Structure formats: structure tokens, C-alpha cells
Amino acid sequence: MKVLATIAILLVGCASQTPSTSRPVSELTLEQEEHDLERSGEQCVEKTVMRSDDQMGRVVTTLGALTQLEMQTLFRERADALSQCQSNADRQKAAISEREHALYESAEARDRIVPLSVMTMSLSR
């Protein structure tokens, strides 16, 4: 009878240690945030390019020095705007990465916790 009780305690302890196949909501949320970040980054670049192309289309294309200066200014503004899109995306990626790391750390800490039934069994020997 003691053997059956011991086996039952071990099975309950081991069952509580097995990882679940479904992922926590927080992991799904982080994946969704990463997807949204990627999409918003693409939209930022598209809007910047479209706005820049519109502005360049309005510049009178003569060979004058003023036109060349306007074009250089527009190209510089476009590069700055694209750089801003990239830096915003990098900041958001870093924040997501920090949250993923914290989630991983907390999951790892939970996995290190020994179930009470297993601990009781090992201490009773």
C-alpha cells in the first residue's frame, strides 16, 4: 500500500512538472506586438516614400540651382524620416525584447520550483 501511495505522489508531482502544450497569453501577446510592430514599420516607410515622391513631383524640374537644392533637401528629409521610422521600430523592438526576457526569466523560475508532493516525498525518506 505504501508503494502505491508513493507512486501516486510521484505521478502527481511529475504531472505538475510537465510543460503545457498551449503557450501563455503573454507569449501570444508579444508575438502579436512583434507582428504589429513590423506592419507599422512598413506603413511608416511606405507613407514616408509616398509623401517624399509627392513633394518631388511638385518640384518644377528645371535645371536651375534652386531646383537642385530643393531636390537635395527633399532627399535629406526623406532619409531623415526613414531613419526616424527605423529608430522608432528599434526602440519598440528593444521594449518587446525586454518583456520577452522577463517572461522567460519568470517561466524559468517557475520551472525550478519543486512541487510540494515531490519535496514531501524526498524529505520523508
Image (spheres, helix red, strand yellow):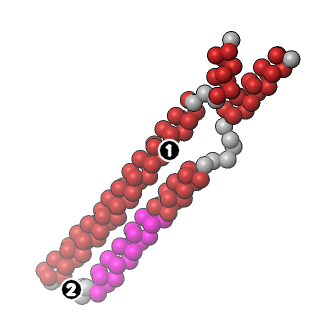
* Residue receiving disc 1: 103
Q: In the rendered image of this protein, does residue 123 appear above or below residue 39?
A: above
Alpha-carbon distance for marks 1 and 2?
Answer: 58 Å
Q: Residues within 10 Å of mark 2 (few under 14, many from 20)?
A: few
Q: Nearer the viewer, residue 118 or 48?
A: 118
Residue on which disc 2 sits: 62
Q: Give the amino acid at mark 2.
A: Thr
Q: Nearer the viewer, residue 21 or 68?
A: 21
Depth order, front residue of 15/6: 6
Badge 1 density bin: few <14, some 14–19, many ≥20, Cα 10 Å: some
Q: What residue appears at the point 73 percent right and 32 percent down from the top-left corner?
A: 15
Q: Is residue 106 magenta?
A: no
Residue 95 percent coordinates (x, y): 40, 52
Is any part of residue 31 visible from this angle? no
Q: Position of residue 81 (x, y in %)?
A: 29, 68
> From the viewer's perspective, is 65 left or right of 122?
left
Q: Is residue 14 above or below residue 20?
A: above
Residue shown at 69% from the left, 19% from the top:
121
State which quarter of the image contains the N terminus: top right
Amino acid on which disc 1 is placed: Leu
